[in-house]
Image (cartoon, rainbow, N blue to C red):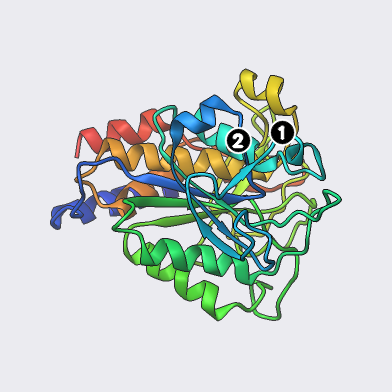
Amino acid sequence: MKLRIALLIIALSIAVFPAWSAETTPKVLVIADTGFSDSDPVIAAHTVYQLCIMDWYACPNGTNFHESGTAAMLTSTQIKYSGFNHGSKMARSAIAAYPDVKLILIRIIGQSPSGNRMSTSESVITKVLAWANKNAKAYNIGAIAISQGSNKVGTNARRCLSSPATDREIAALKAKGIYSFFPAGNESKSEIINWPACISDAVAVGALDKSGEIASYSNYAMGQVDIYEPGYVIDTETVAVYGNDNGTSHSTQYAAAKWLSLVNEFPKVRPALIYWNYILSGEPVTNSKGYFGWSSSLDSVREILVGR
């Protein structure tokens, strides 16, 4: 607790400098995933733009890049196969956490004629980040949430897969005040988390179970998981439409949406200041394995930012 208070005081001391230059138009959340239901009115009402970025020539226009009003959509038939409803779950999770959120949806997973998931390389994540970086101002992008990742490991101290191009894009977005949120992973690992969450400038999100403890399936690495959010569906309507499951995928969307809600609520406050207060805002969380981290409390962040 003393550490958290000290860090909050340090963060607040930054406020003596000029506030981040922000537009008054609310910032938009980019979600990249399997694809999204073309018949979900809730998702449609929150979507402002769509893309398809893939390794394969499997976008709706027959290429590996497509920008249009339906580029990220999947039909009711497509969405039934091989977990392709995952993207719709993620969009609904973001909406549940931030009901006023506006979304840019990007489809990154190809589907074969038989309905199977086609292989996807790590470079697709980099392409999404590069697009967001290039178009950040044009589309008023405020955050990225990609609930996909890789369990490949690297040889550095964090055992993080080497990906200099991805590192650069995440760092460049962060320098613009745009944070990139990724799942820690669901393999119950105790010393490593998934890529790209393990990248130092990324926001790594772990899962809480319904008792408020760090979920047993949530990957953990000391000092690498930035925030823990619920790893379960918090929107009963989502349960009825797409099913009920658990995982750091949900946690990632909640984290990105909550943080973005604060960015939009306090447009004159630096995103970095909001970020540090957000990830240290809640109570400490643990589990029976001895893992330790922080939950979030939007009310606590608001109280701090209103009083600055």
Percent position of residue 89, x then y: 64, 35
Q: How far from the left and from the top, in percent, is residue 301?
A: 35, 36
Res. 229 image quadrant: top right
Label 2 Cα neighbours within 10 Å, binned few <14 / some 14-19 / many ≥20: some
Residue 6 at least partly seen: no
**Disc 2 target residue:** 38
Q: Quadrant of the C terminus?
A: top left
Task: Give me the residue at 78% from left, 60% from top.
Answer: 118
Residue 82's x, y, as percent?
A: 82, 45
Q: Which residue is more in the foreground, 143 or 285?
A: 143
Q: In this view, does 22 lie above or below 56?
A: above
Q: For this view, does 298 lie left or right of residue 39?
A: left
Q: Circle 2 — which element?
A: loop
Name the residue rendered at 20%, 48% in the picture: 23
Query: Which numbered disc covers residue 148?
Result: none
Q: Which residue appears at 17% of the width and 52% of the height?
A: 19
Looking at numbered disc 1 in the image, what kind of residue is underneath it?
Ser
Q: Which numbered disc, 1 or 2, marks the residue that appears first in the sequence? A: 2
Q: In this view, does 171 lie to the left or right of 64?
A: left
Left or right of residue 136: residue 291: right
| Crowd around label 1: few <14 · some 14–19 · many ≥20 (10 Å) | some
Identified by mark 2, the residue type is Asp
Proximity of marks 1 and 2: CB atoms separated by less than 8 Å = yes
Q: Where is residue 196 in the image (x, y as percent from the top left)?
A: 61, 64
Q: Which residue is denoted by mark 1 in the rendering?
A: 76
Q: Is label 1 in a helix, a strand or a loop?
A: loop
